Image (spheres, coloured by chain):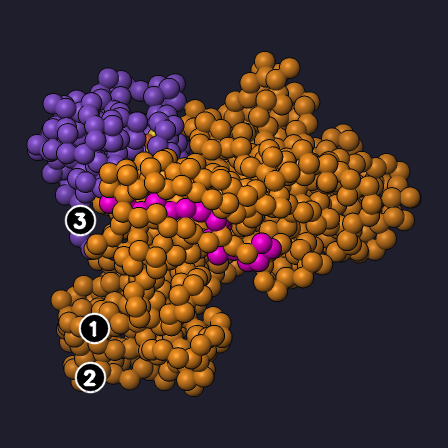
Chain colours: A orange, B purple
Amino acid sequence: MTALNRRHFLKAGATLAGGLALGVSLPGRVEEKAPDLSGRVGEPSGPHLAYLVRIEPDGQVVIGAPSSEMGQGVKTSLPMIVADELDVAWDDVRVEQMPLGIKRDSEGNLSWLHVSQGAGGSTSVSEGWQPLREAGATARALLLQAASERWGVSLESLSTERGVVFHADSGRRGRYGDFAAAAAALPLPEAPPALKSADQFRIIGRPQAVVDAAEIVTGQAEFGIDAELPGQVYASIERCPYHDGTITRFDDKAARRVPGVIDVVTVEGPAPGEPFTALAAGIAVVADSTWAALQGRKALTVEWNPGPHAAESTASLRRQMQDAMQQPGQVVLDDGNVDAAFDAAADSLEAEYFVPYASHAPMEPQCCVVDIREDSAVVIAPTQNPSGASRMVNRLTGLDRMAIEVHVTRLGGGFGRRLTVDYVAEATQVSMAVKRPVKLQWTREDDLKHDFYRPCGLHRLRASLAADGQLTGWRHQLASPSKYYRRANVEADKMWTAELYPDDPPRRLLRNVQLQYYSMDSGVPRGSWRAPAHYANAFAVQSFIDELAHRRGEDPLAFQLKLLGEPRDLPYEQHGGPVFNPGRLAAVLKLAAAKADWGERLPAGRGRGIAGHFTFGGYAAYVVDVTVSDGSLRIDRVVGAIDCGLVVNPNHVIAQMESGIHDGISTALRLEITLEAGRVQQDNFHHYPLAGLRDAPREVENYIVDSPHPPSGVGEPPISPLAPALTNAIFAANGRRIRELPIADQLMG
Amino acid sequence: MATFVLNGEAFEFDGADDTPLLWVLRDHAGLKGTKYGCGAGHCGACAVHVDGRARRACITPVGAMAGKQVTTIEGLGGDALHPVQQAWIEEDVAQCGYCQTGQIMNAADWLQRVPNPSDDDIEKYQTNLCRCGTYARVRKAIMRAAELSRDGAVAVVVPDTGEATS
Ligand code: FES
Ligand code: FES
């Protein structure tokens, strides 16, 4: 960062109470080209909209949390980064969730006002790391400057500790709040302030608890479902159960007679084949309470036109995949000569794996509050994507982006579901129709039946081995309905880019590697589900490596370590790059193995499996212990290891490992979305049985590698290796190879 | 029309008796700590105490509450934290936090009858679902809550419920 553009990067000013407020925005991160230059131009107003750091004259320190908190811990970890450089006591900091901040330059380009505010792809910490540190350090520098001027002493003679400025020579001291007003009037320092070295961190790297812990356990924390706007009405929507189906006719007479029902309005679905607005066409019942809206909805009679996908079923999709694989697929990676390697093989192995459609099922069903007014709008939503919400309102209403306020509550889970803003599109339509603030509430049934599901996929892997056991050739064919199928600007021959990451291992670990993709048709909406594609590919690849090891009669860990080889940086061009270091993957495998007593002999019926994977910059591995008896499975113990670079909050890294373990177990055990006659069959938790505490291992241990690398996110890396570690353990226990998820009743009989 | 005692005070609901207690609490009493997760009794996010016992408010018609004592998360600890809440903070259980009030209400009920819980007890009685996967810490927090209750060693901490929840 040069001194020249620092003025664009940071912005200082006064708070309403006359304290110091400091904002940060990243140059060169243009969010999008504004479609329309008319309307109001300016920054969102309000006392705390524009700033990341606020120091009030009364000494209060407020730090903004820019990214959405959905359980991954960023409402704690991002402000920790600011607070450490600012040099305040963490206990003295109050954290506020920041509303969407965007700004428009004179040419009409919109960009982030501060830092990127989407939460997805495990990027919040890695992208925020540098700018948030600079923001904290700059605020501290301004306070020091103000102190040096007031006391007439040199800057060098001053120091800070926990929110207090010290002048050692005179013994003078003053709280940050004493200098906040003066600091607010100072120009920004020309040169970027020096940042702390890692050994100077006092907050970063130390375990901190969830900032909202007390509010959460007392029921005071605000989730999307708790948001309110004065004068709001409540809406519930009956949606078309067929993908891309439409409303033929409906009768709302009975619904309108239900006490409390105010209105019944239609919601337009997405245009077939086009990017989604709402997920489905529907009929919204608007009432004076949630329950009245639900009762009104029950009283609707609707006839649907099932549309183009009415014949689709899980079985038809599976046939489509099997049929497609009779032919060669689209070759998306072709290193060396796989066919020659296969021809020359001393031995070879082929196996197929299947991963089903899955739903995100966050514990908080979709919801939001939207108020569309004549010349402005307010959205309060538990969304991972506040700028997407703003764009959606702009698209549906024509309101200027700067006139759309978006507030983010805590999210009752995200997992990628809340990257899409279909619920905002629905509430926007309803608010436009009824001209009032609308609180939209989905039911659990709505949430399971209408989702952007994790794509299902059929994986066929084939590998050849030389006489000495070396892998010589590797082919991975994947047939799946791509999550990119309905994105703007993604061509048909690029569908694979969402489903296969060519630089994933084993690329460059052996010479001959080929990837083929088959893009399947399906009407099922799909989207990003925690560790998109990695979840499925890790299951296939890590299972297959285990199979190869057993085929060779070798220890699976030793076999994989031999494949990974020496630590070295290999190029990695997909998200999570620019490099993949097999040595770091080997290290987490070895650490988990050592802590889990890998290699120990286990009694009959017990088994131990291992798997590791690189996801979005982070390396994670698990060793899972199971007991299998009479068809029943008990997961006894899981030992995990992660290398996510420098750790901001070790407590939350461990929490995310625990989350990956339990989500991994839950999804592998019983979760699948199936289709019959064009409709999703699951409608509540009895059909989509999340794992309960009784499924959870009694022993869970996680270890963090002390890593000199820059921080990577931890929301996603911990889930990918769990399922294969579990199924590899089952194989070790009873020789049954699970190649299809969920495990469900495959161990019976 | 139903009249009952809600967190120690008389409460009257004049809507239909078959309205689930959950929506009466959330939309009419303004008590939003009780969460909606499934509406069908599967998840436990809506757990409250009725005459001291955990009930799933989404499948509890408000009419059945007539004359009863209903306690929600907001009323669980009175002015202090309940030992279960205290333990939940100490073990830093919450991830997204959405299921946690229900988890706490449920545990606070059965721990009264099982003051020395085993792993088996926890697996048997703590049936609330958590999508984020906080089960490892729920186990620990229940053990810790049992300890705190036995010792009577609960700090009287009044949580800051000010603007910090943004
Ligand atoms: S919301 Fe009541 S049990 Fe799920
Ligand atoms: S903490 Fe998110 S559902 Fe339990």
Q: Residues within 10 Å of mark 1 (few under 14, many from 20)?
A: many
Q: Eyeballing the image, is A688 above or below A56?
A: above
Q: CA distance from mark 2 to mark 3?
A: 37 Å
Quadrant position of the C terminus of chain A in the picture:
top right
Name the residue at 36% across, 39% down. Answer: A297
**Mark 3, chain letter?**
B
Name the residue at 30% across, 68% down. Answer: A374
Name the residue at 14% across, 37% down. Answer: B80
Residue tagged 1: A15
Q: Quadrant of residue A588?
A: top right
Q: Secondary structure at mark 1?
A: loop
Residue A273: say if magenta.
yes
Labels in figure, total? 3
Q: Pointer 2 and pointer 1: residues touching (CB < 8 Å)?
A: no
Residue tagged 3: B160
Residue tagged 2: A149
Q: Quadrant of residue A162?
A: bottom left
**Mark 1, chain letter?**
A
Name the residue at 69% across, 58% down. Answer: A492
Please state the extent of the stretch shown in magenta in the rendering: A272-289
Amino acid of disc 1: Thr
Q: Residues within 10 Å of mark 2 (few under 14, many from 20)?
A: few
Q: Eyeballing the image, is A123 above or below B3?
A: below
Question: Which quadrant does ligand 1 occupy?
Answer: top left
